[in-house]
Each structure stands twice: as C-alpha cells, then as structure tokens.
Amino acid sequence: MAKHIGTYSGIALQPRQRWSPRNGLLSEPRTKLLNSAVASYTAALRANGYAYEVEPIGESPHSIVTTLNVDEGSGPETILNDLWELDSNDAEKSIWELPKVRAELRKTGDIWERAQVRANIEALVRGDSEDGATAPANFDPEVYSGLLRSLISGVEAFAISTYVLRRVITLPALTTLAPGFSNSNLIYTTAQLLAFETSIPFNLGNTLPEGYWQKKPPSASQQSDGRWVYRVEYWWAKEYDPFIYETQT
C-alpha cells in the first residue's frame, strides 16, 4: 500500500453536480484529503451543519470528502422527521385506587363516612379494632372481603398498564427550534389533545381512548452525527384528581 510523505491541507476537486426534483441542479464541493485528516475535516463540517460523504480512494492514503448541498431541507428551522408512537407504560397504584374499590366507596356520599369506612378497615388490618370486620350496608360483600384479604396479606398496590403517546422529532445539527416546555404536566382531554397536537395522524388519533392525557416535560438529545432528537410524551388515565392536577383550558 502506498505511503504518503509530507502534509497538505486538502485539494479542491471539480464539484459534483446532482439534480434534485425539489431543488433542481445542485453543485457539491469535493475535497481530496489524507485519511489522517478526514476526522478533523468532517468534524468541522458537522459543527457547521453540513452533511457529507467520505469515499476512500482504493489502497491509497487519500479519501475524497463530498460536502452535500444542505438546501434540501436542512435549514435551522427544518424538521427532518416527525413521528408519533402509541406505546404503553406500567404504573403502580394503591389498592385503594382499584376501580371496583373506588366504585364501592363512592356509594357513600358523605366524605366523613367514607373516611370512617377506610379507617375501620385499616384499623382491622393492623389488629387495633374489629369495627371493620363487617362490610357496610351499601358495600358489595365480595369486594369488601377481597379488599380485606389483600390488605391482610400485605398487598397494598397493584400494577396497571396505561397508554403513552409519544412524539419524536429529528432536527438538523444547527437547529434553532427549542423543545416545547409549555403546558408540561397539564391535563388534556382526548379532544383537547387532538386540537393541540394537530400533527397526530388521523388513523392514530381516531383510535385514542377517551380519558385524560398528562403532558410530560420534553427531552432533548444530540446524536453522534450532530442531529437533535426531541421527545415528548402524553400519559393517559381514565380519570384524575382535579385538586392535584391542573387542566388545559
């Protein structure tokens, strides 16, 4: 294999011409470099937002670096990819949030009486009182006995899978677009979410379940090729506590 003696900063070759249906005739600079200089040269291209191709020249110590025309959708405000995903997320909830338990507790309209039912159950589980041994008159006996058995056995929580709607945006290295932190942690109804995120594909939006979606703070990460990837997630719930969470108005 040939070995090069000496150094040089690079030789500009005849530009490569390429025709694009979007931008017409494009002229792309080509530079002949020592292989040892390719890494620093292409690092500078990445830092300035350029795409490039590296073509080794056979067994020689040289390569040709072609700087690709960046007018094809790689400006500072360009979105290279905008993808939506419907995924799932596992969450752990208190056994008191089990839907059938909550349904029975709601049969007792008075908050004090409802609190007393729970206090009696918890006292029975601790062995401090027998007041919770008998189900209240308006409480389903099977649900009540099942709740007692679980709590006495040490079961205090259960796992549940919920929907996660995720948006993944890919941007150029020198993007001027920032992650969208506004409205983080707010609650949307399904209709409000579809009105707010207008880029959700119809076939996906049409299948989203009714309920409530909490917007999570976005994440941003730069890839090894310099491009940025922003992600934002919406977590679904059938219901929520309006005292704790704020809604999108």
Image (cartoon, rainbow, N blue to C red):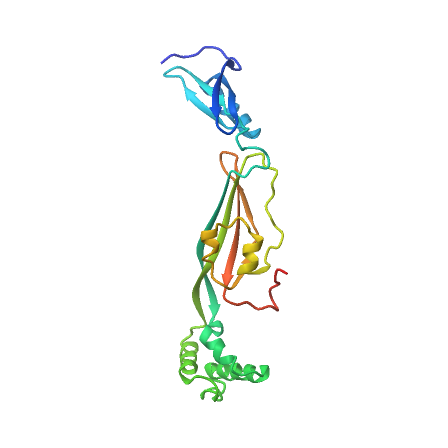
The image quarter containing residue 45 is top right
Name the side, left or right, on which 90 lies relative to 190.
left
Instruction: Kindly give the residue lying farthest to the top in the view shown.
Output: 5
- Residue at (60%, 64%) from the top-left corner? 245
How far from the left and from the top, in percent, is residue 166? 49, 51
Between 176 and 157, the one lying in front of the other is 176
Dividing the image into 4 quarters, which one contains the N terminus?
top left
- Residue at (43%, 82%) from the top-left corner? 144
- Does residue 224 sit above or below 194 in this rendering? above
Dividing the image into 4 quarters, which one contains the C terminus?
bottom right
- Residue at (55%, 67%) from the top-left corner? 240
How far from the left and from the top, in percent, is residue 191? 54, 59
- Residue at (39%, 14%) from the top-left corner? 60
How far from the left and from the top, in percent, is residue 169? 52, 43
Between 9 and 228, the one lying in front of the other is 228
Q: How many marks?
A: 0
How far from the left and from the top, in percent, is residue 54? 44, 23
- Does residue 192 sit above or below 36 in this rendering? below
- Does residue 172 sit above or below 109 in this rendering? above
Name the side, left or right, on which 49 lies relative to 34.
right
Between 134 and 199, the one lying in front of the other is 199
